[in-house]
Image (cartoon, rainbow, N blue to C red):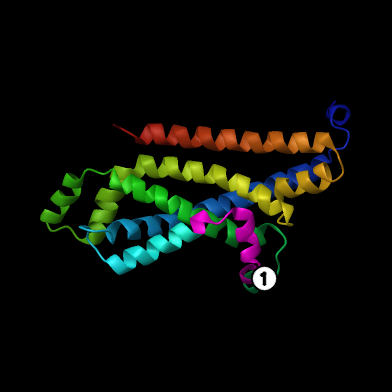
Amino acid sequence: MLSQLFPNVDWELMWEATLETLYMTAIATALTFVIGLALGILLFLTSPHQLWANRFSNILTGAFVNIFRSIPFIILIILLIPLTKFLLGSIRGPNAALPALIIGAAPFYARMVLIALREIDKGVIEAARSMGAKTSTIIFKVLFPESLPALLSGITVTAIALIGYTAMAGIIGAGGLGNLVYMDGFQRSREDVTFVGTVLILIMVFLIQWIGDSITSRIDKR
């Protein structure tokens, strides 16, 4: 039945490309969460009137985040080719896409983290400080719990953006559904390959959004 509806689709290749997209998205999302969280916390804590208030550090971190957040992803991939080749020895395959995916998404998520932290009631932080809580205690016992729903919503949005990034990375040989749709679908005028690849990407997006929303709604007790 499927072979009649989609005669040009190689289902083995489609499945392999789907797994590659899931692999790139999962690894990049996990590392983006860690790096973006660290950058966002640093931005927050070094801002005026906060625990590590430091104008120079805040400006430097903010500039890094703003620069890499503003570069279009397809251009960022090209700019990072020398770094990717140095780190991995190749610019092709799912692993070769990871540096660009992480560097492109982490600053984006860092801004979301900063926004989430700024929404925390200042009185809660001040109360913890007045009781002599250490910085690490404030971070893990106050900032994280208070901002967790917003942090999870942010990483959900970022993960969905990363799926789009993997599709763009596929155009220059990173593998995944983007590569298959472009090489086997678009360039060979095989509309059924393009259609199936697009549907699979949409399914991934809907699943990630549903999982993210479900977890966030369970955690958010407001």
Q: Position of residue 27 (x, y in %)?
A: 57, 54
**Horizontal side, residue 209 vs residue 137: left or right:** right
Q: Is residue 188 above or below residue 222?
A: below
Kindly identify the residue that appears in the image at 56 percent across and 54 percent down: 28
In the image, taking residue 43 as reference, residue 7 lies left or right, namely right
In which quadrant is the N terminus drawn? top right
The verdict on residue 177 being magenta is: no
Where in the figure is residue 135, as x and y percent of width and height?
23, 60
Position of residue 58 relative to residue 110, above or below, is: below
The image quadrant that residue 181 belongs to is top right
Range of the magenta residues?
68-85
Check disc 1 and report its element: helix, strand or loop: helix
Give the residue pinned by disc 1: 85
Image quarter where the C terminus lies is: top left
Quadrant of the rendered image containing residue 60: bottom left
**Residue 6 occupies quadrant:** top right
Predominant SS of the magenta segment: helix
**Which residue is at a point 22% across and 58% down the rendered structure image?**
50
Residue 79 horizontal/vertical position (percent)? 62, 65
Residue ranking furthest to the bottom:
86
